[in-house]
Image (cartoon, helix red, strand yellow):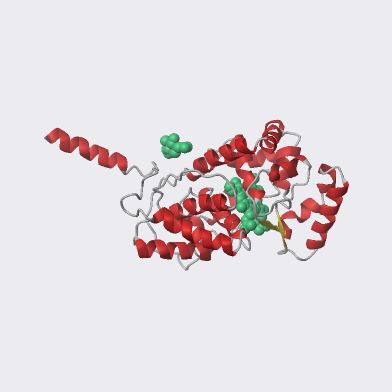
Amino acid sequence: MMFTIFSSLISVSQAQDPSQLSLDYYSKTCPAAQDIVKAEMECAVRDDPRNAATILRLHFHDCFVQGCDGSVLLDDTYSLQGEKEASQNANSLIGFDIVDKIKNQLESECPGVVSCADLLAIAARDAVLLVGGPYWDVPLGRKDSTTASFSAADTDLPAVNHGLVTLITKFLAKGLSVTDMVALVGAHTIGKARCVSFRDRIYGDFGTTSHSALTSELYLSSLKSTCPASGGDDEVSPIDNVTPTLFDNSFYHILLRGEGLLNSDQEMYSSLLGFETASLVQKYALDPIAFFNQFSDSMVKMGNITNLEGGEVRKNCRFVNS
Ligand code: HEM
Ligand SMILES: *[C@@H]1O[C@H](CO)[C@@H](O)[C@H](O)[C@H]1NC(C)=O
């Protein structure tokens, strides 16, 4: 008898290990959670396919700073400096209203149960699926942070002007391999970038990497008309100009042609140091299934970056619970 009680206590404490995610985390406490997120994401993406990109990027920027803990969602307050004004996020991250809407639905169905970090992980998967990408099961059980880190958002997130070695270093620092990086950056098959993110590239080495083929010249001149040498910083252009709202592998074909919009993307193929990354770009361009499989695996890995401090289930994704 004593033994049974003792061993069941152990198994309870193992089940609550905060660093271990599980597929059935909400199966008893909020069985409708995944359906609720899915229904809201269907609306959002039907409304505007870019919303798929927006949510996917939010999850990435969440996971790279303190782990996937919803820290990116926190608003600035008197007592807390959030991450929204960090250099890679300011004037760029959007979609917080979509998160609020999903959270409201979750709270009315099962109050205080589903974390904002899990919400983002499920929503990012649904986003990808809704625009033609792969499906994967999302491990759940993340907690929301009670802190954010403006400084880690500045130091840990990769940036367009980083060279290949810095990009690789930033992914390795999060436990993600070169293969994970090249697959995950394939997320740029959807969504848009601002002129300020690609100006240096189009007035810089775009012509060199693209070997000035006629079609590249035409693309380049249309980019320049969207994004003048000065001014128009917030004008946007699709990152994948071939199939901007479809999750496919055309992004890698664009890199093979040397027409990547973002300097960091083209680095994967054109950097002199990029033997390994260039061969992965070729692989995913040739084999869309290999890309989908690796993207799914790498998303699970990225979603597994944990904030070891644990946390809470926020009632409102923008604020810590009082
Ligand atoms: C090599 C590392 C990466 C760099 C340097 C990078 C950089 C950027 C930049 C500069 C933009 C445009 C932002 C703007 O102009 O406002 C962007 C957009 C985007 N990024 Fe990345 N990114 C990287 C990796 C990733 C990863 C790993 C994901 C997701 C798995 C991702 C998902 C997205 C998406 C979906 C968009 C479009 C967002 C929208 O349309 O609202 N990126 N990225
Ligand atoms: C997720 O992280 C846990 C521990 O933090 C580890 O045991 C597990 O293997 C990881 N899973 C994946 C898919 O990376």
Across and down, in percent, residue 169 comes to: 61, 39
Across and down, in percent, residue 173 comes to: 55, 40
Tell me if 273 is positioned left or right of 147 in this view.
Answer: right
Q: Determine if residue 56 is in view.
A: yes
| Residue occupying the point 61% across, 63% down | 48
Q: Quadrant of the N terminus?
A: top left
* Looking at the image, residue 181 lies above or below residue 30: above
* Looking at the image, residue 167 lies above or below residue 198: above
Q: Determine if residue 317 is in view.
A: no
Across and down, in percent, residue 128 comes to: 56, 50
Across and down, in percent, residue 49 comes to: 61, 59
Of residues 277 and 55, the one drawn nearer to the viewer in this rendering = 55
Tell me if 70 is positioned left or right of 294 in this view.
Answer: left
Of residues 288 and 190, the one drawn nearer to the viewer in this rendering = 288
| Residue occupying the point 63% across, 63% down | 91
Q: Quadrant of residue 22?
A: top left
* Looking at the image, residue 147 lies above or below residue 289: below
Q: Quadrant of residue 134?
A: top right
Tell me if 150 is positioned left or right of 239 in this view.
Answer: left
Q: Quadrant of the C terminus?
A: bottom left
